[in-house]
Structure formats: structure tokens, C-alpha cells
Amino acid sequence: MALSSLSIETQILASILGLQLVLPLTLIAALALSRPAGTPGWLAATAVVGTYLTALAVIGQFGVPLPWYAPAIQGLLGAG
């Protein structure tokens, strides 16, 4: 089935699921399973994943009615 034959709502839903579920889980798994050569590589990879997850948590606040303290809880739990 070609992507263009899907409804726009289905395409939007697939994009949202991809960017907010599949990509973060893939980044976390890649970070957990990778073996960087040294500390600078590990810090760079961790910074990239952490930045994406933090941006996702902050931007996601505009679409979902969560309490104002939700990003702090996500940060404490290591999810952002």
C-alpha cells in the first residue's frame, strides 16, 4: 500500500507515533546497546538523546493537558 493512498489523518497519526514513540525508543536502545570508544563519544551520544527527549517532553506539553510539573517528574525518572 502506497503512503499516498492513506488518509491524511492516518499519515499524521503514523508521523506522531514515529516521532514520539518509535524514534525515542530507538535512540534509548541504541544508547544502551552501543559501545562508544571513549568518554567523549558517550557524552556526545547521551547529550543528543537527552536533548531530543527533553525537547519532546517540553513540546509535547502543548498537545497534551498535563500538569505543569510533569517535565520535572519526567526528568527525575530519566525520561527527559
Image: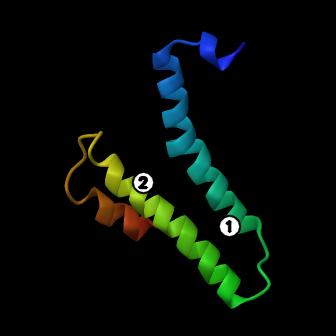
Of all residues, the one furthest to the bottom in this rendering is 39
| Residue at image point 59% right, 74% down | 46
Instruction: Classify mark 2: helix, strand or loop.
Output: helix
On the question of residue 80 being in view, the answer is no
Q: Quadrant of residue 76?
A: bottom left
Q: Are the two marked residues, 2 and 1, in contact with CB atoms closer than 8 angstroms?
A: no
Determine whether 69 is above or below 46 in the image.
Answer: above
| Residue at image point 77% right, 69% down | 34
Instruction: Classify mark 1: helix, strand or loop.
Output: helix
x and y, in percent, of residue 3 in the image: 64, 19
x and y, in percent, of residue 74 in the image: 38, 61
User: Disc 1 residue type?
Assistant: Leu
Of 48 and 69, the residue lying toward us: 48
Determine whether 46 is above or below 71 in the image.
Answer: below
Measure how far apart labels 2 and 1 are at the Cα level: 17 Å
| Residue at image point 29% right, 40% down | 64
x and y, in percent, of residue 60 in the image: 35, 47
Residue at which label 2 appears: 56
Q: How many marks?
A: 2
x and y, in percent, of residue 48 in the image: 56, 69
User: Left or right: where does residue 69 sit relative to residue 29?
Assistant: left
Mark 1: give few (<14), some (14-19) or many (20+) Cα within 10 Å: some
Instruction: Tell us which disc is closer to us: 2 or 1.
Output: 2
Residue at which label 1 appears: 31
| Label at residue 39 | none
Q: Quadrant of residue 40?
A: bottom right
